[in-house]
Amino acid sequence: MLKKLQQRWKVNGLNLVLIITTFALGGSLCGYTGRKILMLTNLEKGVLWFILYIVLMTLLWPLCVLVISIPLGQFAFFKNYLIKVWGKMSGRSKKRQQKMNIAIFASGAGSNAQQIIQQFSDSAHIHISLIVCNKPGAGVLQIAEKAGISSLLIEKERFFNGDHYLPELEKSHIDLIVLAGFLWKMPAALIHAYPKKILNIHPALLPKFGGKGMYGSKVHEAVIAAGEKRKRHHHSLCR
């Protein structure tokens, strides 16, 4: 159950614990506050008391959860969570759910990213929401700026050993990750957070011409050097 929640909310293990803790403490604070308010009314416990208690709990719960989320560092998650809940209750989420938000991970000039952005620039169902890059000054960052797409420059320690930038992906409501010339290996936690939702584009027959150093023109050079008769694009879905 905890793994399913982690995948659904796209968070790491530590944030999952903090989120559950926020739910628990927020609920306790809500119940305590509701009872204190009702004590001021001098009402006897009865039907009216319970009706008012339920109404107060409904009104107070979002506020109490947000208050608790601040010191636990989960305010951004609960703000988005409450917006989604309100959207479902009011019926406003249907339009938002029609669009798939994509994050493109790239390390170089961004020629593949450019083509993907152009392909879906007028799409009613797909939105390129974020460009993720591990190299300062990479051409793909300029492409993102010109296209008006948010970019995220990542560093190695946090990507592999920290929170893997999952909070940033959650803020952008990312549904699918496309690896378009991304040179780092994806950490297991990120793959688990996006099961069957990571598409890797590699310009060669895999696994024969993959791995370290196999990117850009180096892939083509390796294929020619090996005397291969043909080379095709291969798309793999990370599980």
Image (cartoon, helix red, strand yellow):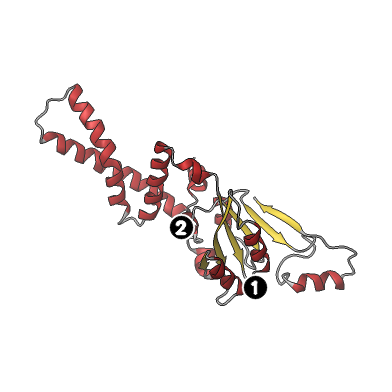
Q: CA distance from mark 2 to mark 1?
A: 26 Å
Q: Residue at x 31, y 46 (%)?
A: 65
**Residue 51 shows in the view:** yes
- Pointer 1 residue: 109
Q: Left or right of 20: which side holds 151?
A: right
- Seen at 22% across and 27% down, the residue is 50
Residue 49 place in picture, x, y as percent: 18, 27
Q: Which of pointers 2 and 1 lies earlier in the amino acid sequence? A: 1
On screen, residue 108 versus residue 5, left or right, reads right
Q: Position of residue 43 (x, y in %)?
A: 11, 28
Residue 5: numbered disc: none
Q: How many marks?
A: 2
The single residue placed furthest to the front in the displayed view is 122
Residue in the picture at 15% in, 38% down: 37
Q: Which residue is mark 2?
A: 167
Q: What SS does tag 1 mark?
A: loop
Q: Residues within 10 Å of mark 1 (few under 14, many from 20)?
A: some
